[in-house]
Amino acid sequence: MHSIDDFKKFIVTRHWRYAKTMPQWPHEYTVRRYDDPQEDQTVFEEAVAFIRAHGERRTFEPTGESSVYFDIDERQYWTMGAPVAETIIINRALLDRRERFGEK
């Protein structure tokens, strides 16, 4: 992934699911599909690497957990920090949720 435009193309092609087990922290996620021959594993990994290379480290105050967040088009994107090749989920939430939950 070489540009913001490449990242935008990636995110519009993904299926995003609402994280219903965490209604107190509304967000969506997309899952790497190892068993789908249509899934380009390289592109998924490039998206993870792009978030980490171009984002900024912030702490999610309710949990004290720190992640790298990449903000674009009124949303923030993050992963949970596993090595790129082992990352299976990319999360996203509306940017205005940050203030609501005290994220810095």
Image (tube, grey):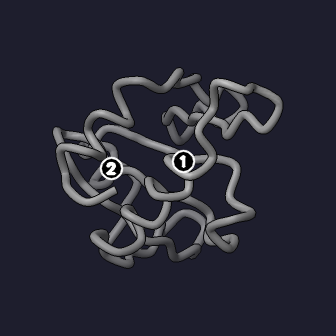
Q: Label 2's element?
A: strand
Disc 2 to disc 1, C-alpha distance: 17 Å
Position of 61 relative to 22 (above/below): below
Which residue does the image show at 59% across and 31% down from the upper left? Answer: 23
Could you say which quadrant of the image residue 81 lies in?
bottom right
Quarter of the picture containing the C terminus is bottom left
Residue 66 vs 1, above or below: the answer is: below
Can you give x and y, in whole percent of width and height, for residue 42 in the image? 56, 52
Q: Position of residue 2 (x, y in %)?
A: 26, 60
Residue ID for mark 1? 44
Q: Residues within 10 Å of mark 1 (few under 14, many from 20)?
A: many
Task: Please indicate whether residue 63 sits to the left or right of residue 82 in the image.
Answer: left
**Residue drawn at 31 percent across, 69 percent down:** 55
Query: What is the quadrant of residue 24 in the picture?
Result: top right
- Quarter of the figure with the N terminus: bottom left
Q: Identify whether 33 is placed above or below 84.
A: above
> Residue at 27% across / 54% down in the picture?
99
Residue 34 in percent (x, y) is at: 78, 38
Question: Which residue is at 38% across, 78% downward?
Answer: 57
For this rendering, which residue is in front, 3 or 67? 3
| Residue that badge 2 annotates | 76
* Residue kind at label 2, given as amino acid type: Gln
Mark 2, Cα crowd under 10 Å, few <14 / some 14-19 / many 20+, is: many
What secondary structure is found at the residue carrying circle 1?
helix
Q: Left or right of 98: which side holds 15?
A: right
Looking at the image, residue 78 sits to the left or right of residue 86; the answer is left
- Amino acid of disc 1: Phe
Q: Nearer the viewer, mark 2 or mark 1?
A: 1
